[in-house]
Each structure stands twice: as C-alpha cells, then as structure tokens.
Image (cartoon, helix red, strand yellow):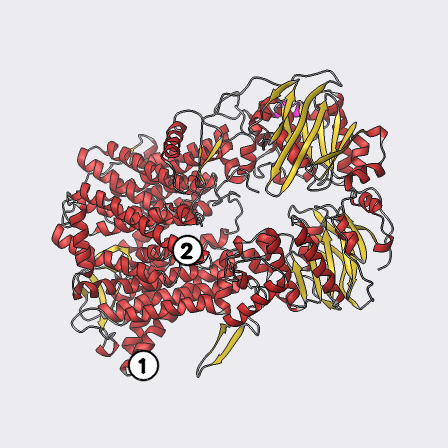
C-alpha cells in the first residue's frame, strides 16, 4: 500500500530530472500524483509523399481491451495513398478506439502498426504528428478565444521565436486554404466561427503540420447539409492531391457511398466487411453494421390503447454549441405504450431527453402531460406531474455517488411521506427524516430489484454499473410515474442486468405507465417498443408500429438514408 | 485644485502598484487554469522576507531579491499542491494564505528581538524622471516614484507582450482554456501551469515587499489587510486582461488615495473615516456583481488536468 | 468490520499522522528560530493546555469561538460553499449580542437566550448578503465573504468609536463600548475561571448541526447539492434557494462566536473581539477554518479539532511566558497543520485494502 523504497527513489529521480531537461510526457506516480519525465528525442521518420494507390499505413491484428469489453478484436486495417477509406459502424463498434490507437492516444494490447512497411510505436499524439498523421476529432480541440491562426500554430515553434509571426502563418494558411477549398478567415476568433468553419480550421491545423494521413472522426455529424456537400468536395480534392489519405469514421451511409473508395465495417470490435465502395450497396452495409446480434428475446405483450399521456408538439431546442438539435419534433405516447426512439447518439436524443425532463430550455413547441402544458417547467414540477427519468448520464445526473444507497433511493421523495416525521412542538414545526422508513424502503427496493450491495448504507460509489442502474430504475419505478423517460437504459450493462431492466420496463408498461425508450441498441428498440420512431439530425424521420418495422430499413434510416413518411400516431 | 489632483493621483499610483503587481501575477496563474487564493499569504511572506533581508543587509535590492525567492517558493508549493497533488485549489490557496500569515508574523517576532522592538528600514526613494516629471498634472502622477512603482507599471506591457505576443503565451492560454487540446498538440500542460503559478508567487512576493520597502519602512503582522484578495478580485474585474487590470488597480488606488485625502482634510471624516476605509472592499463586491458573468474566465480554471480522463 | 467503519478509522489514523507530521516540522522551525528544543516547547504546550484547571479552562475558552466558526464553515462547506466570512459574522454577532444584552430589560435566563438569538440574527443577515450574491449573481462567495469581513470590522470600529463609545474610552489600545450589565454576562461554568457556558452552547449547536445535516430533508438537500449539483437539479431541488438558506444558517452559527466573546469574555463590544489578546491580525476565523478541515467537515468531528486548536492557543501562551517562544509560533503550527492536511488529502482518499 505504501510506496516501497525503490519506487520512492524512482520518484525522486523523476522529480529531479524534470527540472533539468525539457520534458514531455506525463507520468502518474503511484497515488495519482503527476509529474512529467524526460522523453527520448523525436524520430525523424516521416511519411513520405507517395504514388497514388500505394499502401501507406498497415494496422495488423490490433486488439485493445478495456475492463469488461474488447473494444478492438484483432482488427486489420490499411490505408493507401490518395484513397478515402471509410470506417463504418455504430457507436461502440470500436471505430474511435482504433483511430485513437493510430493517433497515439492509446496503445494497443496486441498487434502492430506499420508505416512504409516499417514497424512503428506511437506513444503519444506528438509521435503521430511527427510521423505525419493528423487527426480531426469529433469534439474539436480548439481554443475558442484564440484566432484561427493562433490555433493553427499552437505548440509549434515560430520563425521569430519567441515572438509569434502571425503574418507568415496567415500566408501559409491562405495557401492551404486556396489549394483545397477550405475557406476560412485566419483572423477570426474560433468562437465566432460556425461549426463547419471550425472543422476546416482543424483540417488546416493538420495540413499545416504536413500531415500525409488525415483521420476524420465523425466529420459530418456537426455539419448542415450544404456544408456536408462542400466538405465532401474538399475531401475529394485532398485525396486527388495524393497527399492525404483519409480514414473517415462515421455511421452515415449516404456519405460513405458518396465519397469513399473503400469501406471497412466494424461491429462489436471486429471487422465484418472490407469492400470497395463501388461494389457494394447501402443495404448490404447496413446489414453488416447492424447485424443479427440478439442477446435474448423478451415476449412483448399486446397493448390496449389508453389515453395519451405524453405529448410533444413541434419541439425545438438548441444543443450546447448553439446549433439546432431538435427541429419540430412531434409525437405522443399513450398509457401502457412503449415508444422507442431509435437513432445513433448525437442526433438530438440527449436534448430531447433533457427538454422533456426540464433540464434544458425548449426554444419552441410544447410538452404536455395528460393535456397539461409542462413546457419549460422546473424539474420539480415535472416530477410532481408524474414524470420519471432514467437519465443517460447515470453517474452525474441520476445518482449522488457519495450518498449511501438508501439516501439515493429517496432522491426525489425525501421531503414527502412516509420519509418524514412530523412533530408539532409548541412554537415551531420541524420535519425530520424518518430513517427507519428510509431504510425499510431501501431494503425492499434492493430486494425487489436484485441490487447487490453489502448494505443500504454503503456509499453508492462502490456499486458496479449494473447495480447502479438497478438502483435508478428501482427509484424511478417505485414512484409509479405516469410517464417514464428511459435513455440508454442498458448501455454498458452485463447480460443479466440488461435482461432484468428490460423485463421491469415491460412490467411497468403493463401497469399503465407510458414509456419513452431512447436507445442506440436497435435490437432493444425492436424488441420492446410498440411503436418505433427514428431520430436523425434532430428530426423524427419515421414513426411506425413495431410490427411493421424491418431492421435493415431502420438501420438505413438511422444512418440517414431514407426518410419515410410519418404515420399518424 | 491641480495640486490636489496631482497629490491624489501620485498617491493613487503608489497605492495601486502592489495591487497591480499581485494581480498580474495572479493573471498568469489563472490564465493557465490555476486559481491561487494564497496571494495574500505570498504577499505577506514577500513582505517579511524583503523587510528582513533589507534590515540585515541594508540593501533594498537584496530585499527585493529575497522577496522574489520566497514568493517563488510559495508559488512552487502552491503548484505542487494544486497541479501535482491535484488538491482542491480553493482550499490549497486558503491554506497558503493562513500559513503565510502565521509564518510571516512568526518570523517577524523571532527575528526582531521580541514584541517591543519596532525596527525600521529606509525605504526606496522616489526617482523623478528628468523632464517628464515636470509635465503639469501627469508629471508628478506618473513620473516621480520609487523604482518598484515604475517596475509595476512596466510590468503591464511586459505581461501583455508575454501573454499575447509570444508562442509561450499562446500555450498558456491554450492550457487554461482547453488543456486537452493543448495536450494533443504536444504542449506540456503540467509544466506550463507550474511556471505560471511560480510567476504568480514571485510577483505576489514582490508586491508584498512593496509595503515595508516602499510605503512604511516597517512591518506589521497582516499588513496586507486583504489587499491580496482585492488583487484577486481585480483579475476578475479586469476580465483577465492586463490593461484592464491596470485600469482597475489605478481606480482602486485613486479611491484609496482620495479617501486618505478626505481623512486628512478633517471635517466629519475624522469621525467617520471607517466608511472611507470600507470603500475598496465595497467596491470589490460591486465590481464582482457587475462583472461576474464568467465571461473571459479561462475555461479550465480550477480544474486539475488528468490526461485521458473523459 | 464494515467498510464504512474501517474507513473512518483509516481517516482518523491518517489525520493524526498528518497532524503529528505538521507538529514535527513546526518543532524544527521553532528550534531553528528560537533555539528551544521541540520536546521542551511541546511539553510547555501540553502543560499550558491541560496542565491544571486554569489551563483546561483557557483551552475551552478559546475552543468555543473556534468551534462556532468551524461549524459555520462546515455547514456551508457541506454545500460546497466556502464561507470565509467567519470574522465578519463573528463581529456582527457580537454587535447583536451587545445590543440585546445592553438594551433589553429581560431577566437573566431570557436575556441570555435573547443575546444568542440576536447574535444569530445579525450574523444570518450578514451571511445572507453573501448567499444572495452567490445564488443570484454568481459572485464568488470566497471573495464576497472576505470583503464583508473587512466591511464588518469597519462598521464595528466606527460604532465603538462614536455612537457606542463607552465611558472608559480607549482601553488597552482598543476602543470599547460600555460594559454589559451583569445579567448579560454568560454564566461561568467553574467559578473563578473564565470558562463560560458558551462552550456548552457550541457543543449543542454542533449536535444540532449534525442532526440538521443528516436527519432533516433540508440537510439532505444541502449535502446533495454539495456532492452533485447536477443530480440535485435532476431530482427537483431548488439550488439557489437552498444555497441562500445555507449561507444564512452558516452566518448565524458563526455569529454565535461573537456572542460568546462579547457576553462571555469581554463583556463589552470591542473591535478586536475577532482576534486574540492584542493580535488583531490573526483571528479566530483562520483557526476555525482549519479546525473545520481537520474535522473533515463534520460537525461532530470539529469538536475535538476545535479543542485541539484551543489547546494550541492556550498552550502557546505558556510557551511564550516560560520559553520565550513568540506567540506567532502557534499560527505557524496552525498553518502547517492546514498544509499537511491538504497535501495528505490524497492519502486520505486512498482506498482501504480489505
């Protein structure tokens, strides 16, 4: 537990060493202290400009494991000069992991990377950048108050060290800009730019550092349709120049078809297909993406149509970045019905969840519970109106991790009977928590919901993911809500927890609760919903009874391909 | 009338100088993402080291040097606590405040032969810049001061230059706004923060040395009387920009000077001078109310950086 | 043994180690500075703190305002609000106590209640200012409470020099008000010594604070907001209203320290009641905050830690008389303890191996 003498001397050596050389690289010393240490000098090895069609990078047998899951399972992947090679797959399929490995953010557990046939190890992004690999992340790595030029040149040595030589950089940016059609104003500050423009800055950043390989992570997820078209033109130009080879990560089929030369499909950490784009069709890709992975089946009963409990009318809302995230979303859910919202994350689901539960402002439209207008009301009022919420963000939103299990189970109801003693003293009235009732309540719930915990007084922090979710479920369901918003309820959970939660949700719907099920797991949606809506780009692109839904079609719609006419609810 | 303006202005600048220095130091620390509430303690440590060193060596220069070193050490301690140990920055700052408060008083008592001696040192004399100091109004206000005051004024453009015109300054801004992004570009987040916090400590130390070495010629326990926190507020008031911090500190300094003048002029103020003394503190609160939208605050302020998190 | 109890033992063990570490470093500093060996110095300290009845009385006399301020810090701290306004709240509380004790013609027992209630009220109002600024205007509560400290000091200073100036004028270099009537004096616990009932009130308040935080819905909300404002928002709690209430409460509790000092020790209002005997600089507030941290922000935990710091102070007096060690050594020790605790936070947070 305490540091052994050898580790202590090592630490002291680190501390002393850091003050001497120019250090890079971070080292965690034991109990989470952080210092930096010397690194071996950077290699001069770089990717050279190549003839179109030659293989530049080869990744073989890449395997990466995280606790509980194999993110990449012996993946082979290669990129050729002048090629746009798309990496396709749902969230969690392993695309980002693979590319993070290529960019040096993570190290593979097994497998190797070869550049020009020579084996390389990438220990940090700096190694990748030095090698000539550039990455444009899904969440931009930009500094908002700085200008475009400043962002591009950040971390690089200037010709007039230590002064910044903005003019020279601006000229170079203008050149690159013209060459590839990346229109951007070098003097503009990042926060002033549109998302599309910010993305161009990120690309210029990579090109400025003379990247020969460009990794683009979900590049079009934040672009408007016209911007997407522009973007694809730029991609083609860069590819034609032979310089940039672009692994292009997405779940959006139309784009993959439009711009890539080859496509590799990942599912659950494995490669399920590697094809030349011109030789394949969207349907096939969708099938490979979505697959036949069915964990288990639950029997879905027939629902008798009750009254409308939750109604959402022409809902509009902005995302954190200020872009429209919900565009005229309308649907309704009846008593006892489960409406499943299918879609890949990032298409407005989170904003939908937050608006309905009072955690985000709606910019237009309305939310109604049994006819009562609850748009933009406080979470308290919504809870009192009968809304239950299983949040996507379990750890931050759904639970107070430092509270005990028992305390978490009364999060919304702590000031109501039976958890309160009411004592009337002669001159003032004080309400005390009735700990016996609280514990009784907790004991019952952990039994009913099979939560594994040493006791109800343990801090919730110590529970595993599946148990945490059971807790939240227990709490929300025990309040007998009129409508339940369940967002990604089984994400990341093991089989038994998943099964249990789905069973409980079905039970609840049988008892009359209207359930809005938001999930990326298409199997789950298909298994559990009475009706299915598909969300893409902030809109409901289709709404149909589950019986009529076909998995591939839904997959296509989730990937933005088809837009079916909405059926009346 | 002109004379009044001149005296008040000159005093104002002299009073503003330590606030300015300390605030500029804090600016570096905060721009790199570290909230340092220990300025007050660092100032006090700077004050006592400067005072003691001067007393012993009779050299004001060595006094300032001592303040620089001690301030830097305090800064190093703060950096260690908040960057490497990732302690809660607010609490770490308070701890350094209290430690500095106690330690400075202790050193004073110990070094100065008991509680009844009142040692004094000669202070920095004023250096009038020939020619410029004879300009009416502006002359005496700006150009007839001790060297430390000039230093603080010059520090403003230097600070501006460092933070906004060099590659290093760019790195600092990046580290304070989006350390993740900075890290992906190969910038050493930890080292940058260490350096900035140490700079903050050094400047706070020198600012503290002001009080005994420029103003008073002696030392009192807790002689900073909250000035470190006013400097802290000045950074917010100045929206994290050096020139605005200069404006803010001059404003505070002049109000302080005006208040002294009012006291000296007698009248009702002899009996109610406390209300004048309150002014800087009330002003700080008002300034924070007006400007407490976090506009301009480095986005990663108070958040320790851990690579790979999230 | 449950994980929970093991955790508490572990924390206490580490805290004791850290305190000892700080004392060790402090001992070295004292030795370098004054030539007095640490063992000698600390033996005087312990004798001065607990050696005889007077010592114990003095220890508890000092522990009392420290405890009140620590509690004010802790109650706010549980909501993640840093209440650094103990000084100002103490002063306002002293004002309230004095006004009640001087002007209210009530019989002794009722008068005592009125004194505490009045002190609480003024301190609560003072805390409310900071609470309002934070909840509605997002003003950093640390800066606002610290500024309010100074403002309070000047208010009291002016009052005591002008409208409330006592007939004795300036006593011991500090102006003070008229004396309180003896019915307004807090009764002594042991006759002949300075120890008054304030300490009992403080302990009672500590227990009440514990009950409030863990046994009432309000306290539940306070802790939830302190741990996870996002989850608190999700579950319907009104964050700004609860923050305001917490600051009001914390201000009031710290203010009771003022009542203890004014009605129990000085029996008059002076502008230096926040300090200790002549050292107008370092105040009970600094000590109170450290005591709060040492007590792990727990109302019951701060009781022993306040007594510890009270012991440091009364022991420090003896260190000074007997050993010639400057009084400020105590402040250095305090500061060291604080730094050690913070640095040791990582150790405390380490997982307990089974």
Residue B136 in view: no
**In this rendering, position of residue A399 left or right of residue B162:** right
Picture coordinates of residue A11, whole percent (x, y): 39, 33
Residue A1 in view: yes
Taking depth in this image into account, of A101 and C70 the one nearest to the observer is A101
Label 1 vs label 2, nearer the camera: 2
Picture coordinates of residue A431, whole percent (x, y): 49, 74
Residue sitting at the far left: C322
Taking depth in this image into account, of A143 and C2 the one nearest to the observer is C2
**How far, Cα to Cα, is label 1 from label 2?**
45 Å
**In this rendering, position of residue B46 left or right of residue C135:** left
Numbered disc 1: what chain?
Answer: C
Quadrant for the N terminus of chain C, please: bottom left
Marked residue nearer the N-terminal end (1 or 2): 2
SS class of the residue under badge 2? helix
Specify the segment rendered in magenta: A170-175
Disc 1 and disc 2 on one polypeptide chain: yes
Numbered disc 2: what chain?
Answer: C
- Residue C111 magenta-drawn? no
Q: Which residue is mark 2?
A: C6
Q: Which residue is mark 1?
A: C110
Q: Residue at x 18, y 35 (%)?
A: B56
Q: Residue at x 58, y 24 (%)?
A: A121
């Amino acid at each position: 537990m305490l540091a052994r003498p050898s580790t202590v001397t090592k630490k002291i050596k680190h501390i002393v060493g850091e003050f001497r050389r120019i250090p890079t690289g971070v080292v965690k010393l034991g109990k989470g202290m952080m210092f930096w240490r010397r690194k071996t000098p950077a290699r001069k090895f770089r990717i050279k400009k190549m003839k179109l069609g030659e293989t530049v990078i080869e990744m073989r047998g890449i395997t990466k494991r995280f606790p509980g899951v194999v993110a990449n399972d012996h993946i082979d992947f290669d990129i050729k000069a002048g090629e746009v090679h798309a990496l396709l797959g749902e969230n969690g399929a392993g695309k980002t992991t693979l590319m993070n490995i290529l960019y040096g953010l993570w190290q593979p557990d097994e497998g190797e990377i070869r550049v020009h046939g020579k084996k390389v190890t990438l220990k940090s992004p700096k190694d990748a950048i030095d090698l000539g690999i550039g990455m444009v992340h899904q969440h931009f790595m930009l500094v908002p108050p700085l200008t475009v030029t400043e962002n591009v040149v950040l971390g690089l040595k200037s010709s007039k060290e230590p002064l910044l030589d903005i003019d020279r950089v601006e000229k170079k940016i203008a050149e690159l800009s013209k060459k590839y059609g990346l229109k951007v104003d070098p003097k503009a500050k990042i926060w002033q730019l549109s998302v599309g423009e910010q993305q161009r800055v990120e690309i210029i950043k990579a090109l400025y550092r003379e990247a020969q390989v460009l990794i683009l992570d979900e590049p079009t997820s934040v672009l408007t349709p016209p911007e997407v078209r522009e973007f694809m033109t730029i991609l083609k130009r860069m590819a034609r120049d032979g310089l940039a080879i672009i692994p292009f990560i997405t779940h959006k089929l139309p784009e993959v078809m439009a711009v890539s030369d080859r496509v590799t499909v990942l599912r659950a950490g494995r490669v399920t297909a590697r094809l030349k784009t011109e030789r394949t069709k969207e349907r096939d890709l969708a099938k490979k993406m979505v697959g036949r992975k069915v964990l288990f089946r639950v029997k879905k009963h027939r629902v008798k149509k009750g009254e409308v409990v939750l109604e959402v009318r022409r809902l509009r809302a902005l995302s954190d970045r200020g872009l429209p995230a919900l565009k005229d979303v309308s649907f309704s859910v009846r008593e006892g019905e489960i409406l499943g919202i299918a879609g890949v994350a990032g298409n407005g689901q989170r904003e939908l969840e937050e608006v309905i539960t009072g955690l985000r402002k709606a910019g237009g439209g309305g939310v109604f519970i049994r006819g009562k207008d609850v748009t933009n009301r406080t979470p308290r009022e919504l809870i009192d109106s009968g809304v239950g919420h299983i949040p996507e963000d379990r750890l931050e939103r759904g639970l107070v991790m430092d509270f005990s299990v028992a305390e978490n189970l009364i999060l919304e109801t702590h000031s109501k009977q039976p958890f309160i003693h009411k004592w009337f003293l002669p001159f003032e009235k004080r309400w005390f928590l009735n700990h016996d009732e609280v514990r009784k309540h907790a004991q019952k719930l952990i039994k009913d919901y099979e939560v594994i915990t040493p006791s109800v007084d343990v801090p919730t922090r110590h529970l595993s993911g599946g148990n945490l979710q059971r807790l939240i479920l227990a709490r929300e369901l025990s309040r007998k809500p009129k409508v339940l918003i369940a967002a990604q309820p089984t994400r990341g959970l093991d089989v038994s927890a998943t099964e249990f939660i789905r069973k409980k949700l079905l039970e609840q719907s049988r008892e009359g609760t209207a359930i809005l099920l938001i999930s990326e797991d298409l199997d789950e949606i298909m298994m559990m919903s009475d009706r299915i809506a598909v969300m893409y780009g902030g809109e409901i692109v289709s709404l149909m009874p589950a019986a009529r839904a076909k998995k591939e079609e839904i997959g296509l719609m989730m990937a933005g391909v088809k837009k079916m006419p909405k059926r009346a609810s | 009338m002109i004379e009044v303006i001149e005296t008040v202005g000159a005093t104002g600048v002299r009073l503003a100088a330590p606030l300015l220095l300390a605030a500029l130091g804090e600016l570096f620390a905060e721009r790199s993402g570290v909230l340092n509430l220990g300025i007050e303690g660092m100032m006090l440590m700077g004050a006592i080291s400067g005072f003691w060193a001067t007393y012993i060596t009779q050299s004001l220069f060595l006094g300032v040097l001592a303040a620089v070193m001690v301030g830097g050490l305090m800064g190093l301690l703060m950096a260690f606590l908040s960057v490497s140990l990732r302690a809660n920055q607010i609490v770490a700052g308070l701890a350094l405040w209290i430690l500095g408060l106690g330690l400075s008083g202790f050193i004073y008592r110990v070094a100065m032969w008991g509680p009844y001696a009142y040692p004094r040192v000669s202070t920095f004399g004023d250096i009038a810049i020939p020619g410029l100091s004879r300009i009416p109004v502006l002359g005496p206000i700006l150009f007839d001061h001790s060297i430390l005051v000039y230093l603080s004024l010059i520090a403003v453009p230097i600070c501006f230059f460092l933070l906004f015109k060099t590659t290093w300054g760019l790195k600092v801004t990046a580290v304070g706004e989006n350390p993740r992004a900075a890290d992906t570009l190969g910038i050493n987040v930890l080292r940058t923060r260490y350096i900035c916090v140490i700079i903050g400590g050094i400047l706070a130390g020198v600012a503290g040395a002001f009080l005994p070495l420029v103003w008073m010629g002696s030392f009192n326990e807790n002689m900073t009387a909250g000035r470190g926190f006013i400097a802290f507020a000045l950074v917010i008031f100045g929206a994290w920009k050096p020139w605005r911090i200069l404006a803010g500190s001059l404003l505070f300094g002049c109000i302080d000077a005006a208040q002294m003048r009012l006291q000296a002029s007698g009248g009702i103020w002899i009996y109610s001078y406390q209300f004048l003394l309150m002014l800087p503190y009330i002003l700080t609160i008002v300034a924070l109310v007006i400007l407490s939208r976090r506009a301009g605050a480095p986005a990663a302020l108070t958040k320790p950086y851990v690579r790979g998190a999230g | 043994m449950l994980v929970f109890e093991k955790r508490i033992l572990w924390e206490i063990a580490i805290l004791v180690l850290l305190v000892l570490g700080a004392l060790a470093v402090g001992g070295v500093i004292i030795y370098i500075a004054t030539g007095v060996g640490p063992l000698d110095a600390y033996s005087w300290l312990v004798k001065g703190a607990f050696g005889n009845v007077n010592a114990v009385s003095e220890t508890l006399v000092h522990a009392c305002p420290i405890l009140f301020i620590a509690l004010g810090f802790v109650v706010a701290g549980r909501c993640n609000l840093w209440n650094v306004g103990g000084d100002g709240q103490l002063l306002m509380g002293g004002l309230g106590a004095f006004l009640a004790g001087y002007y209210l013609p009530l019989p002794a027992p009722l008068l005592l209640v009125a004194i505490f209630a009045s002190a609480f009220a003024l301190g609560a109002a003072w805390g409310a200012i900071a609470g309002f600024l934070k909840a509605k205007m997002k003003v950093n509560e640390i800066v606002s409470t610290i500024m309010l400290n100074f403002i309070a000091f000047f208010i009291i200073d002016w009052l005591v020099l002008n409208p409330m100036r006592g007939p004795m004028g300036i006593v011991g270099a500090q102006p003070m008000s008229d004396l309180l009537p003896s019915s307004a004096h807090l009764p002594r616990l042991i006759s002949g010594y300075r120890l008054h009932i304030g300490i009992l009130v403080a302990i009672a308040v500590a227990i009440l604070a514990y009950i409030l935080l863990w046994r009432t819905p309000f306290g539940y909300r306070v802790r939830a907001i302190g741990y996870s404002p996002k989850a608190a928002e999700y579950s319907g709690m009104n964050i700004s209203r609860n923050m305001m209430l917490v600051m009001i409460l914390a201000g009031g509790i710290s203010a009771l320290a003022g009542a203890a000092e004014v009605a129990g020790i000085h029996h008059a209002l002076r502008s230096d009641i926040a300090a200790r005997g002549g050292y107008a600089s370092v105040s009970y507030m600094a000590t109170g905050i450290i005591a709060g941290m040492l007590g792990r922000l727990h109302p019951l935990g701060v009781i022993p830690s306040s007594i510890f710091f009270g012991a440091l102070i009364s022991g420090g007096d003896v260190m000074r008389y007997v050993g010639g060690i400057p009084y400020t050594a105590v402040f250095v020790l305090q500061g060291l303890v604080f730094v050690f605790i913070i640095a040791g936070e990582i150790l405390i947070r380490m997982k307990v191996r089974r």
